[in-house]
Amino acid sequence: MKQLSSRLNERIGDNLLTLVATAGMLFLYIPVLVLIVFSFNDNRSLTLPLRGFTLKWYEKFLSNSDMLTAIGNSLYVATVATAVTIVIGTVAAFALDRVTFPGKTVFRRLILLPIALPGIITGISMLNMFKLMGINLSLETVILGHATGLVSIVVTQVYARLQRFNRRIEEASSDLGARPWQTFFYVTLPNIRLALIGSALLSFTVSFDEIPVTFFLTGRDNTLPMYIYSTLRRGITPEINAVGTVIVVLSLGLIILSVYLLRQSEKE
Amino acid sequence: MNDIIQIRNVTKTYPGNVTAVDDLSLSVREGEFVTLLGPSGCGKTTTLRMVAGFELPTSGQIFLAGEDVTDRPPYERQVNTVFQDYALFPHMNISENVGYGLRVAGMAKADIKPAVDAALATVGLMDKAAVRPGNLSGGQKQRVALARALVRKPKVLLLDEPLSALDAKLREAMQVELKHLHEQLGITFIFVTHDQKEALVMSDRVIVMEHGRIVQSGTPSDLYDHPVKPYVADFIGNSNKLYGKIVSADAGQVTLQVGANSVQSTPGQTRYAPGDEVLATVRPEKVRLLADGEDTGNFSVIPGTVREVLFHGSSCRLEVDIGEGQLFDVDVQLERALHTSGIHGSGASVNLAINPDMVSVFPIAEDNV
């Protein structure tokens, strides 16, 4: 009897957990679903009932040259910021893992600080710096601003991977006659590749929809989030829903790609 | 024969003033199978890593085939290592692992393949060429690590406790295989282990180390029968310890008093005088049980009482009380034990006969144990 009731409790507990989890998921994803549905709805205002299927909002955003420029700017900023970050972050992670130098602890804390700093602080301080140095604001200053924050993402990921890395296989490589650069490209790099890809994808996404730092550091050029934000003053248009849907689909694609890559490498 | 490796007065000190290797000098002849034996922290692995080039000596020199390689990086030394955890490349399959050393040397793909195939054939893993290391058993990984090191045709193969991760059965099989491989290839092997049985089975020469220094270097039987220190007697095999005093010392033969018994020994060069406190060690299997009325010859005889009989399969161990509660272990081959089983029950009285040549004597001051 006791056994039965405990099993019953377990059953109820499981069901409750499923319920709560489902509710949480719905809360997170229903807005996204609404966005997608309304991007195909043949009505200017976002009200029910739905009026029928249309692709005209997609046509509209594809012919909106301001928006296309903004998307192009965002892709440019995210790509370059990610590339810069990966190089600097990887070098820094190696330094933290393998080199002993004075002030190493301070260096580690400092490099991780930007992730804890509000974007507003980063934005204002870099804005001051650029003004002091007499540098004009542009997409390139945005890239530098993003990179400072993203470096901490890459360093944490790559450093964590290096800490788990079996240094013996580098010794084995060297023992087998490989010069240091051969060991790096043939043995070290392939084994930390996933941490690199993972942090690159993450950096790209973070940079792509970053607002606060961009707000302070951009010149006349707008990135996509900034552009969307500026058009919101005139209310949410179905056009925004359309571009939102495209971003959702692309992000989903990126995530599935990264999961697939991770699975593949686990098989290895 | 030529010395393929010479280690001259090498010292390795780590930060914090930890001395891992202390003024060690050692020569290894070409084609020799040398084992560095000792407990963990005795400096054996550090010595090996300095020969490989992973660690630089604090002072001293290392010569490989007559060339000073002390400051050369690992990739410029013609030695290869089999690591304790194998250190196979997880992202490469077996043939890529084995061919790695040839690939980085710039060998053409067409030449690498036959060399890899031959190496895999040597270790019997032809069918695993396309498999990744993660899908191999410990024993198979071991073979891959061997093949990978051997494909470079090194002058010296360094083995850092390569068998310690294998189970007992497999370890014994691999010991024999390694020994065969050594004979077949004629390459110099330097093997590091803390397992004395392993060292005795495989080596031409065993070097016992303690606190970064060499305690004794010799053939396995040398070390076993004539240890120079109680440490060696203790580390290799089992020993009975008898504490006593020298009562007479002639040329080549000393007599010592152990409790109520007297024991003869033929010590090596060490000179003793009557009254010296000494420690004598005797191997359990070098003791014979005397049959009634048997002539003792020049053997020492110690009477005792059997306290315990432990069955070991091929042999039996008797724990014999030789007075004042001191227990003395005697190993008896089972066949002989059967013949004389009548007297070997617990509580039986026995006479132990000990060959003076099999008794090692040490001044008591040296005995730190």
Image (cartoon, rainbow, N blue to C red):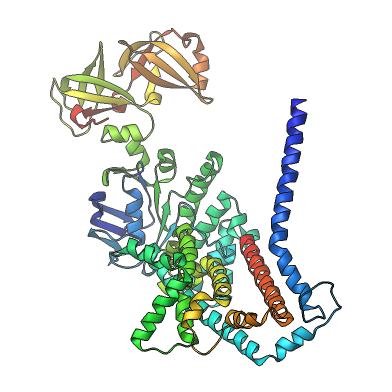
Which quadrant holds residue B270?
A: top left
**Total labels drawn:** 0
Q: Is residue B263 left or right of residue B349?
A: left
Which quadrant holds residue B83?
A: bottom left
Q: Nearer the viewer, residue A140 or B66?
A: A140
- A230, above or below B54, in the image: below
Q: Nearer the viewer, residue B51 or A61?
A: A61
Q: Nearer the viewer, residue B88 or B142?
A: B88
Image quadrant where one finds the C terminus of chain B = top left
Q: Is residue A100 visible?
A: no
Q: Is residue A203 left or right of residue A5?
A: left
Image quadrant where one finds the N terminus of chain B = bottom left
Q: Residue at x 49, y 50 (%)?
A: B178
Q: Nearer the viewer, residue B13 or B136?
A: B13
Q: Is residue A153 visible?
A: yes
Q: Position of residue A229 (x, y in %)?
A: 60, 79
Q: Position of residue B70 (x, y in %)?
A: 28, 64
Q: Residue at x 13, y 24 (%)?
A: B273
Q: Position of residue A76 (x, y in %)?
A: 56, 85
- B290, above or below A15, in the image: above
Q: Position of residue A100 (x, y in %)?
A: 32, 63
Which quadrant holds residue B362?
A: top left
